[in-house]
Amino acid sequence: MAGRTAVTRTSGRYRVTARTRLGLARALPPAILLLGLLAAGAQPAWAQAVTEGGRAYGHFPVIGSRAAVWIAAQVHLMFAAFVLGVPMFAVVTEAIGIFGKQERYDRLSKEFTRLLLIAYSATALWGVTLTFLLITLYPRFMSHLTEIFEVSIWIYVALFFFESATLYIYYYGWERWKAGRAKIFHWSLGILLNVWGTAVLFIADSWLSYMMSPPAEVTADTAPAQVQFWSAFANATWMPINIHRLIANVVFGGAIVGAYAAYRFLAARDPEERAHYDWMGYVGNFIAIGALIVLPFAGYWLGREIYEYNQAMGITMMGGFMSWLWIIQAFLIGVLFLAGNYYLWIGMGRIPGAERFTRYTKWMLLVLIAGVIVWATPHTMIANREELAAMGGTHHPFLGVLGVMSAKNTAVNLMILTTFLSFMLYRRANKKPVVAWAKQGTVVQGLALGLSAGVVIFYGIYGYFVTAIVRIGFSVYQVISVLAAMMLVVVIDFIMLRGAESRGAIRWGQMPTRSQYVLLILAVSFTWLMGLMGFARSGIRQHWHIWEVMRDTSQWAATPALGYAGIVISVCVLIFLAIVAFVFWIGGLIEKPVLAVTDETAGGAAGLAPQPAGD
Amino acid sequence: MLATNFKIAAVVVLTLAAYSMLANMIPQIQSEVPEELELSGEVTAEQLVGAGERTYSGAGGCTACHGLGTRAPNLLTGDGGLGAIGTRCAEREPGQGCKEYLYASLTEPSRYVVEGYNAIMPDARRSLSENQIWAVVAFLQSQGGEVTVTAEDIASSGGGASQPEPAPATSSLAASKEPRALLAELGCLACHVLGDQGNAVGPGLTDVGARRSADHIRESILEPAAEISPGYEALAAMMPVDFGERMTAGQLEALVTFLAEQK
């Protein structure tokens, strides 16, 4: 969205100034803990030295400055996403525990928070590493950035203190404030923790999104002191990135919690422990996949803002040298959808009554595989003459027809509907509705899903016969029909299953070990995908530190090809997971969690969320 | 437990290896930093074509749209069976030779939008030097045609051996305050209809004065995203945002006044 514009006249020409657009991109590596401290304390003298002719770039041995900063930023960002995402569902699970009167959710929330406590240190350490690398390797760029954003950096540091203090009180006050009003107070601390965390994220996002989409009035000749703070802060891609990251952090946090549960499940020695971590893994996966379904809509908004800000940047992202990146992304998301569904289908093996749904599994698998194939079909990719000749044109002569947006939008919407159906069947598996209209309700649910699929397919086919401009609008109808159907089905389900009879308790812990490896693959894939998308966001600036304002003139200015990027991302993921494994191990040493999944009473969960069925 | 840890590590490493391998299996395209193109007075056609091909596939970013054939005509493989651009550039515009047409379509692209495509191409002078533009012209001529670009052509448009940074794209707007000339020169009619002229991509201008005040029209020219006409949201990004930089105040006011009178 655009803010108000003031048009002023300068030297006989009109200039658009004070262009405060709300919307920005994704971030300068968030949570740079000591960036603020260092910048606040030493920045003036240091900045002055740079502007008076100091060096513009440093040199990092062996891997080079670009890779050094890349790795530090990416690993820091992964931890930051974890420590921002986990509090979100920690506070939700605590609320389920309080208001749904299910103590096991409260214990789960505390266990999440314990992981958070340890991960905080890793986040700060990598933040410090990144800060030092940026200061020593890119001093000119950092001077520019800190001069514009110094106020926000100070606030950022203050928020970090508040956030840390709140986290400590939240965790260590858990047992002290565990009942009555004191518990509500404790829960409100969790909310406050999220408020600090979100503010920290938004501030860090402003730095990074400014690099992508500086205000129109800022040019290469603009001195940093002349840049209006708010105009730079609330730049064009800021808000879309904020929202995209908020959702992505929940996805990521859920996946890592799922991996933690899988690790502990595999290491468990007694059935009770295994049951607890089986349940925890389910919850983590539910949160991750549930939030993942919403993420593409936020991504669409971000992409649209990028196009609106600068069409050339948008084309670079979707159709330029990065076009192949989206094929890799399609493959990864295919893995996520398939693995997420597969985990649910395996899990139905431990739910009495689920066997009546197993006959549908093969059809759902078919839809998902077909969807992945369509989504990953290359079309209109960047290619040289030899490659075009080898392909026989800009796309495959037969399969190319599946590579256009009409087919891809149809595929992804059907995959979302299928995954939603998997969740609903899982949830319904051991429940027997007792309301008189149960049959009719189920028929209406089926019709809603079928009708939605019909709308998606209709517009998918119709899209081949209209112009691109009309076709773009069809994706909105498809999305609306899917969201409407999902909402209707959920509402009916809630009402229909109130007081439902149980067909038998879920046999938590009786999960094949392969299911836990699926959770691990999900976590690795989510993490890798996060790195890939980070490369996409940062890479579309190409040889600009700050788009069309500050050019990268270092020897590392070129944006590398995806092969190199893939290896760097894998290294980042490996570093991150190795430290996470250490964190998990430490987490196990600190305190043995109180295990309990057997205190659950059938049916009474507070909502669709982590309440698969009466167990 | 050791065996379990080993299995977990193996799953993680194998998954990462698979993704890394996938990333290395696709075409590897690195985004290079644009380089200055130095041309001497004795530049040969071969040198120009070589430099043009590098620019076309690299810094120019031409292949992002022209390499595909969907966003813009594919100039190398031929568009709709017409043949490569070098074979037909001389017939594209009456009265214009091949190199003149190619140069003009690079620097004033909104005047040469091929039917069936949108006016999304930016003025090449925004990102390329005159040397690079002429090199691209030579490269395109070489696609089935004869290269006729000479050092004199380059020099005549301000290029040459000591040519500095790319010139601002908008510096060549004529001093005219005649509204219809401005509409043509700014490429407005590539997307807007005025009377019997133009393309109906964006909102029409024939009766714009009846729908919008002069202030509103001015704002729409200077800051198109401030308010988008209903039904045109998807096309909002196509409207250039730099008209405030490209026109003098007098030109802008002449244009606004003219449009406000269209009722």
Image: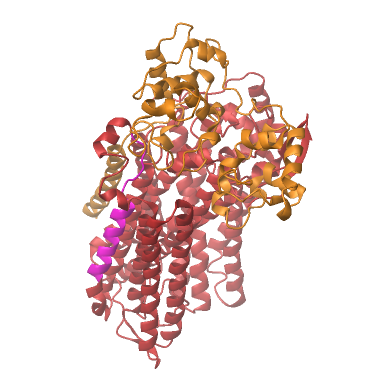
Chain given the colour red:
A
Q: In this rendering, does residue A521 appear at all? A: no
Q: Is the magenta stretch mostly helix, strand or loop?
A: helix
The answer to if A381 sits in the magenta stretch is yes
Provide the letter of the chain coloured orange: B
**In the rendered structure, does residue A599 fall within the stretch colored magenta?**
no
How many numbered marks does the figure carry? 0
Q: Position of residue B51 (x, y in %)?
A: 41, 18
List x then y, in percent, for residue A579.
Answer: 39, 46
Residue lying at the far top in this picture: please name it: B42
Say left or right for B99 vs A143: left
Position of residue B170 measured from the top left corner of the image (x, y, whole percent): 63, 29
In screen coordinates, is B182 left or right of A173? right
Placement of B260 over or under A423, stated as above or below? above
Above or below, comparing residue B26 to residue A161 in the picture: above
Q: In which quarter of the image is the N terminus of chain B?
A: bottom left
Above or below residue A553? Residue A336 is: below
Q: Quadrant of residue A564?
A: top left
Q: Is A154 situated left or right of B27 in this image?
A: right
Q: Which residue lies furthest to the bottom in this view?
A: A436
Hey, which quadrant is residue A471 in on the image?
A: bottom left
Question: Image point 65% across, 44% down: which residue?
Answer: A233
The reply, left or right, for residue A247 in relation to residue A337 is right
The stretch in magenta equals A361-383
Q: Between residues A105 and A585, which one lies in front from this camera angle?
A: A105
Is residue B42 in sight in this rendering?
yes
